[in-house]
Image (cartoon, rainbow, N blue to C red):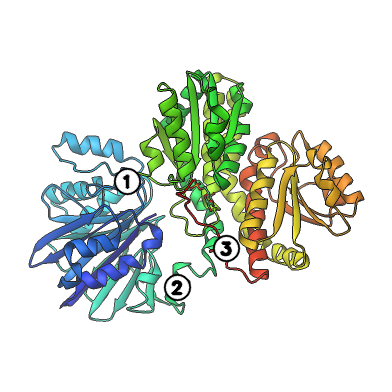
Amino acid sequence: MCGIFGLISKECLDIGEIALEGIKSLEYRGYDSCGIAFQNGGKLTVKKVSGKINDMQKKFNLETLSGHLAIAHTRWATHGAPTERNSHPHTDCTGDIALVHNGIIENFMELKDELKSKGHIFKSETDTEILPHLIEDFLKEGFNFKEAVIRTLKRCKGAYGIAVCYTKEPDVIIVARKESPIVIGIEEGKISYCASDIPAILPHTRSCYILEDDELAILQPGKAEFYNIQNSVNKIDKKPEYINWSVDDAKKNGYEHFMLKEIFEEPTAIRNTLKIEMKDFQIFAKHLLSADHIYITAAGTSYYAALAGKYMINKFLGKYIQGIECSEFQNNLIGALEKNSVILAVSQSGETADTIEAIRWAKKTQNDIKILSITNVVGSSLTRYSDHYIVTRAGPEIGVASTKTYVTQVIVLALIALEIAKLKKAISKEEIQKYYDALISTPDIIENFLDKNIHSVKNLVRNLEKNINYFFLARGISIATAKEGGLKLKEVACRFIEGYSAAHAKHGPISLVRKGFPIIFIAPPDETYERLVGNVMEFKARGGYIISVVSESDKKVTELSNVTIRIPQPSNKYFNLLTPITFIPALQLLAYYAALEHGLDPDKPLNLAKTVTVH
Ligand code: G6P
């Protein structure tokens, strides 16, 4: 996710200041590097930094900049580290075109090779840079600016929200959208604005045009024309929408909190993560297949993603993977870390001090060790210390309690597991395809669940309001879901929880159960189901208040439960393996509404930090 802001005005304005304010209000979409392009008297100037917007402001003194056109960008790196070179805007060979982009051009490698063979020189490692060069090519062929942009976009696969300017048409900004948002605000007859999101426009106007997929707009001072990219001859008649949110509400896209917004972003985060190139998973799979010893390490939520992933990978790999919390990594392995080991490290921030320390210690102790990592942040410390890394595509996560990064971490681990199954021929091609089909349908399952279940989860929380202690119990792979779901409730609603194996809970925890004690059972219909039914009965017999999370067609656990949360998914082994992904939103929502019920701010849990950089 990145943030785009642009403006074009009849009069000369303090464009530097306005553009900076615009991208600052989009900083929640990304903040690892930024840049601005502005036009004055037919000359295009581009300024960029690797760092925050405030760094750019200080470095270039942009508040003093006046002019009539600017496009600006705040970046969340996906292709290429967050360096100055990779920051947007990107330009063509002539320096006449500048472009900012949010999204991913999936076929950029082929297009880049083609453009290079025609003599184009590239300065960055980004997918975005192919866009100004393609536009340059079409302009050279004699197409006008609008037609050159349209022809460029037609050659691209993937997602984009773009804003582009061209010195030879100094009174125009062209914007376009496919899957990545673009909004437009007009101060009639004076100024036109474009942005990735409404908060950037709101200080200037409440009347916004929201671009749909495949739409393009030509912005001129105080007016806009709209076209469809596939059929660009005739203008489209678009009506503006009146936005009455506050700027703060708008950043949360109308959601009350970032946590809720980020739970609802999970389907998109998964769909984007599913677009990561297969070759990355193959590299991981090959290293895991050839290793003698494999460890997986992480902290907090990432550790529970690791536990779910370890189970998925073990299933096809036929070798045991040891999961060790990063803070105990060295203590467990001192004197025991052997040659030909692989460490899989998982961290949404890529900066957790204990995770970094674990892998640095391992590298120092055995220099042939391979570090493979999964993170959500390109250029983070974890990526620098890793031999190979995969970056999840959850986009920036603002809520301190991880939600969408968790599901994307598990998706990546599931994809690695399937790649291993393929390489090892552990199961038939048909079976592998069935797992892929199930994986691809996880965003729809979550969307469907979120659409229909908010009210039932809210009601459940109201009935549980007085309880301080909870058990979250499960067997097999779902123990990871129980631990992670419980952790969410602990973090944001300040309840005491124990996330435990349902079988093992009779060796101690069960002694706490009295009438009405809430116990949440995670009960997909997998190979552990029948025994779990027995565990539910044990806790029910002692007066436990049973809440179960089950698949749609469940009967036995449902009959034993006081309340059931049903996840709309088929009951078969392909979907069962993916329940760490599809069942978790229910528990995240439960934690969210429990926090509200107790008057707590779910975005800022007490005593917790998003990134922990101390040991
Ligand atoms: C902190 C956060 C947790 C997170 C953990 C690990 O404790 O509050 O939400 O799961 O760090 O963070 P990482 O960035 O390594 O995934």
> In this view of the protein, can residue 138 be seen by the observer?
yes
Q: How far apart are marks 3 and 1 (CA)?
A: 45 Å
- Type of the residue with mark 1: Cys
Observer-side mark, 3 or 1, equals: 3
Instruction: Check disc 2 and give the amino acid type.
Output: Asp
Q: Is label 1's Cβ within 8 Å of ligand 1?
A: no
- Residue at the spot 65% in from the left edge and 35% down from the top edge: 574
Q: Residues within 10 Å of mark 3 (few under 14, many from 20)?
A: few
Asked if the residues shown at circle 3 and circle 2 are in contact, with their CB atoms under 8 angstroms apart, the answer is no
Mark 3 and 1 residues: CB-CB less than 8 Å, in contact?
no
Q: Residue at left 46%, top 49%?
A: 614
Locate residue 455 relative to residue 608 in the image: left or right.
Answer: right
Q: Is residue 351 left or right of residue 309?
A: left
For residue 174, the mark is: none
Residue identified by numbered label 3: 606
SS class of the residue under badge 1?
Answer: loop
